[in-house]
Image (spheres, rainbow, N blue to C red):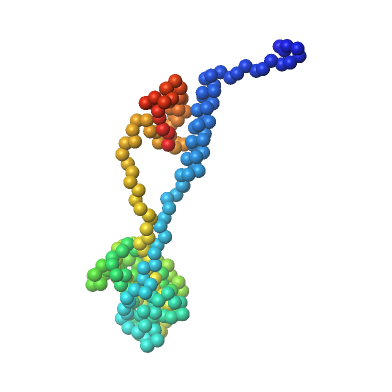
Amino acid sequence: MSIFGMPMAASPPARGRVRRGLAGAVVTALAATLLAVVPTTAAQAAPVLLSQGKPVTASSQEHYGTPAADAVDGNLGTRWSSAASDGQWLQVDLGSSVALSQVVLRWEAAYAKAYRIELSTDGTTWSTAYSTAAGAGGTETIAVSGTARYVRMQGVTRATGYGYSLWEFQVYGGGDSGPVLPGGGDLGPNVHVIDPSTPNIQAKLDQVFREQESAQFGNGRHAFL
């Protein structure tokens, strides 16, 4: 019905619908914010190159131009080369025991067909972290697990008539994921930590809305995180 040809204004929405609509908007905003800031995977610390420039020794050296130190100098134009016989080794002293993650062998044309990666905390007692009888040469990246100060490539069988020859012997490990943040403990009954999978979010927001509607600055205030 209209007066003087003008339509009457629509009736205002019911109070309950306004409250529920507001609470629904809050839930939507909370869910969207949480989805935006919560990472899907945990950050991983990058491994650190531990061996470069560290003290290194070898069972033998082919000639004066291929010392053991050239396998940890970071220069792919220099190399260590052993005597032309099986069973030669190269080992690096990392300075202290550290958690290891991988070893990278950058072979020259004279590589090992069979070899082991060995670990030690004292340079005397060794454990095998990796072993193969089918070495491919080139660049071999090997995942290892363990804590050690000394890491050794123990050659078993040569792939050629020459010795073992490495452009670089790289040992990785460590890595810092950043400071550990304090946490835990009870935040109190009025602090609610939720995520989109929390059940009954709407019901809880409705309950708090009803409690605070007439006591917005009272002692019953709640926080949703």
Q: Nearer the viewer, residue 33 or 164?
A: 33
Can residue 84 be seen?
no
Left or right relative to 225: residue 89: left
In the rendered image, residue 50, in percent from the top left (x then y), is placed at: 36, 68
Q: Where on the picture, by quarter, is residue 217?
A: top left
The residue lying at 52 percent from left, 27 percent from top is: 22
- Above or below residue 152? Residue 59 is below
In the rendered image, residue 58, in percent from the top left (x then y), is placed at: 32, 79
Q: Nearer the viewer, residue 191 or 152?
A: 191
In the rendered image, residue 52, in percent from the top left (x then y), is placed at: 38, 72
The residue lying at 34 percent from left, 70 percent from top is: 117
- Above or below residue 33? Residue 156 is below
Q: Nearer the viewer, residue 19 or 45?
A: 19
Quarter of the C terminus within the rendering? top left
List the single residue furthest toward the bottom: 63
Q: Where on the picture, by quarter, is residue 56?
A: bottom left
Can residue 162 be seen?
yes
Quarter of the N terminus within the rendering? top right
List the single residue furthest toward the front: 217
- Above or below residue 146? Residue 40 is above
In the rendered image, residue 173, in percent from the top left (x then y), is placed at: 36, 63
Q: Looking at the image, how many numbered discs can be counted on the residues?
A: 0
The residue lying at 37 percent from left, 58 percent from top is: 176
